[in-house]
Image: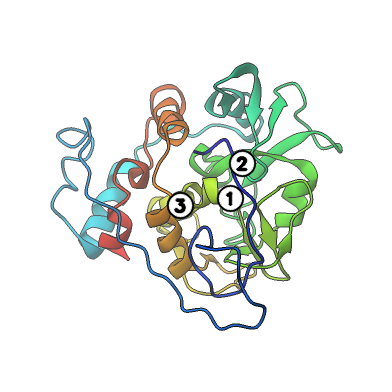
Amino acid sequence: MSIAQTGRRSRRIRGWRPLALATSAVLVGLALPAATASPAAATTTAYDDTYYEDAIGKTGPALKDSLHTIISDQTSISYSAVWNALKVTDQDPNNSGNVILLYSGKSRSKSLNGGDTGDWNREHVWAKSHGDFGTATGPGTDLHHLRPEDVQVNSIRGNKDFDNGGSPVSGASGSYTDSNSFEPRDAVKGDVARMILYMAVRYEGDDNWADLEPNDSVTNGTAPYHGRLSVLKQWNDEDPPSAFEEKRNEVIYDSYQGNRNPFIDHPEWVEAIW
């Protein structure tokens, strides 16, 4: 689900929340009611009795605090090391010489990493200016929110918050953008939500980095906030973790950082905290 976009989507309307319209017969100017998604169903994992032992059964701030303690036990890597790490974490399962680009879903040669047109670079899903952490070792190099993306598409996304609506993004079919927000393709909406919320739990201002938090704004600028929370929660519910996303979580845990994104293992914890 995280590596392919299927179907052509109808004209987007700001505030309309489902991942795909139920019908293509949308009348311009017609007020459509916002749909709601059911909260993610509770799950169990092989890590519940070990890695997540201190978090099981908790909700709200107690759950967030517990998860912060758990996932802060982390090995950090350098920004230069991120290049090679992404070639492993985001490898195309159908072509070992390629990586899958996040917003476009395209498969591109691992060797085309760089800053030129046609290359892929390191996209900070939690925009690095939101908290001003840059690319220094820490939140700026955390693989749980760094993904390969086409240089030009990455530039279009910039440091925008996430929300529904806008105009189609050139080079990233199914993605949309306007002056202050970016909407990724349906197949990775949940991935984006879980990466943003991981960052909000991992970085709480107690390790010389800013206290990162989600909010419901799309005008956060350089403040240590990212939005829009209400939309991210819905994306989490409507696009559950895929096999690609789950494998990526395992690779980061086993081979690089030694920590996990808890919202991939337990997407229901999003609602339990927020």
Q: Is residue 76 above or below residue 93?
A: below
**Looking at the rendered structure, which numbered label has been put on residue 199?**
3
**Looking at the rendered structure, which numbered label has been put on residue 68?**
none
Q: Is residue 240 above or below residue 12?
A: above
The quadrant holding residue 272 is: bottom left
Upstream in sequence: badge 3 or badge 1: 1
Q: Nearer the viewer, mark 1 or mark 2?
A: 2
Upstream in sequence: badge 1 or badge 2: 2
The quadrant holding residue 11 is: bottom right
The span from disc 3 to disc 1 (Cα, nearest Å) is 10 Å
**Looking at the rendered structure, which numbered label has been put on residue 102?**
2
Q: Position of residue 216 (x, y in %)?
A: 49, 74
Q: Is residue 265 above or below residue 179?
A: above
Residue type at mark 2 is Leu
Q: Position of residue 174 (x, y in %)?
A: 65, 52
Residue type at mark 3 is Met
The span from disc 2 to disc 3 (Cα, nearest Å) is 17 Å
